[in-house]
Image (tube, rainbow, N blue to C red):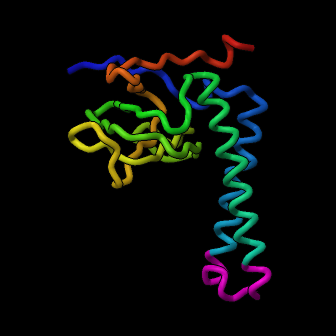
Amino acid sequence: MQIDLGNLSPLRMMLPSELVLATKLTRKVARLRERWRSTNSGKDLGPGKERALSIDISVAEGELESLVDGVLARQLGLKRYMVVHVQRDGGHEDRFQLLSASVHFGFTYQGHRWMWDLEGRRLRKDGSIGERPGGMAIDAGVITRRMLDGSWVELHPTYAEEVA
């Protein structure tokens, strides 16, 4: 089965200001997580500082997730709690209920790239929502969502340069 892979890159879907903010937030989250790891998972800090660092990490991750949720809703119509089927090259695919979305700069076989990181609960064989985690990092592929009547509809992106 040949699928037509659409370009779902965050670079094409985000406005320049959103990309700058996403870069700042991903660096901030990485810096805070590294600080957490370097302090023996917060144990070398006092209880107050450990809690404050944990809260800082949660706030930064929440800001990034809020930014990504807004971009995906505007560009793809993709929202939290939707049931989606994600396909990418190489035959990789997954069906899951979307619970969280983020963006990261990661390594792919094509080099370092910005990618969406979609996570949720995987569907069972009968189509009901299960307990196992599911998800996928994607920058090119096809995303379809399940409608209430059980049919699947492909989501087509509107790119930032078309909107601006």
Residue at 34%, 44% in the rendered image = 129
Name the one closer to the observer, 27 or 121.
121
Residue positioned 68% across, 58% down in the render: 29
Q: Nearer the viewer, residue 79 or 155?
A: 79
Residue 142 in sight: no
Q: Nearer the viewer, residue 112 or 77?
A: 77
- Let me know if residue 40 is in the magenta part: yes
Quadrant placement of the N terminus: top left
Q: Could you say where residue 131 lies in the image, as x and y percent from the top left?
A: 35, 54
What residue do we see at 33% from left, 30% from top?
Answer: 89
Where residue 5 sits, quadrant-wise, is top left
Is residue 33 rendered to the left or right of residue 164?
left
Residue at the limit of the structure toward the top, as seen here = 162
Which image quadrant: the C terminus? top right
Residue 84 vertical position relative to residue 109 in the rendered view, above or below = above
Residue 10 % position (x, y): 59, 31
Work out whether 12 lies above or below 43.
above
Position in image of residue 102 (x %, y %): 58, 44
Horizontal relation, residue 75 to residue 51: left or right: left
Mark count: 0
For the record, the magenta segment spans 37-50
Vertical placement of residue 34 versus 143, above or below: below
**Residue 130 in sight here:** yes
Residue that appears at 41% across and 45% down: 135
Left or right: 121, with 26 as reference point = left
Q: Position of residue 8 (x, y in %)?
A: 51, 26
Q: Residue 93 colored magenta?
A: no
